[in-house]
Image (cartoon, grey):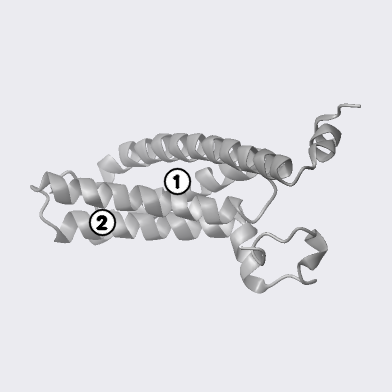
Amino acid sequence: MAALFPQVTGAFPLGEHPAHRFWRSPLLVGVTTGVIVRLYRALTLTVGPNESLLYVGTAFVVGQLLVLGMATLHLGNVTVRRWVWLAPAFAFCEAIAEALTSLALIAGGWERVGSMPARFSDWSELALNTLVWRVTVILLFALLLAGVVQLVRRLNVKRLDREHTLDAVDGKP
């Protein structure tokens, strides 16, 4: 556990690994997530038994875990203070990429609205629905995650008997 959370931040190696640049970019992570999630949705709705409530529910939960997991991986590589703009940027990039992937899937005949194939006239509604739901869910999750991160940090500072650090951060004399 000590290797993952060093007590001295100078313990991190200098330089940046190329994978870190990917995970810190809301555009790259958002687009990748949007494409993967929409392809996953199309695959599950096209191939699987849509009559089974258990199947559809499980597919929905796995899709949400995928989106929120990618959001966590993205946000976990930057400070909480930067989440104020990174979480919305990631959410919008993800939703836009998902909407554009949906458009390509409609053109290929793979996109579904319920059990029926989607048409181009359905795209605006699908895109708007995706935008509203994804942005709302990702922003609420980021807010919850930020609260948990701050709580764990405060408890860790108190556990290490470093209340003077909390006072300095909070601006207390």
**Residue at screen point 46% across, 34% down:** 136
Q: Can you give x and y, in whole percent of width and height, for residue 104 in the image? A: 34, 58
Q: Can you give x and y, in whole percent of width and height, for residue 58 in the image? A: 23, 50
Asked which secondary structure carries label 2, the reply is helix
* 45 left or right, relative to 12: left
Residue 129 seen from this side: yes
Viewport quadrant of the C terminus: top right
Which tag, 2 or 1, sits closer to the chain's start?
Answer: 2
Viewport quadrant of the N terminus: bottom right
Residue marked by disc 2: 42
Q: Give the vertical position of 102 relative to 134 (above or below).
A: below
Q: Can you give x and y, in whole percent of width and height, for residue 137 in the image? A: 44, 37
Residue type (three-letter) at the residue carrying disc 2: Ala
Please, which residue is most extreme toward the right here?
173
Which of 102/20 is in front?
A: 20
* 123 left or right, relative to 140: left
How many other residues sit within 10 Å of disc 2, few (<14), some (14-19) or many (≥20)?
A: many
Q: Can you give x and y, in whole percent of width and height, for residue 117 in the image? A: 17, 50
Residue marked by disc 1: 95
Which of 25/141 is in front?
A: 141
Q: Quadrant of residue 25?
A: bottom right
* 103 left or right, relative to 139: left
**Residue at screen point 52% across, 49% down:** 93
Q: Quadrant of residue 147?
A: top right
* 8 left or right, relative to 19: right
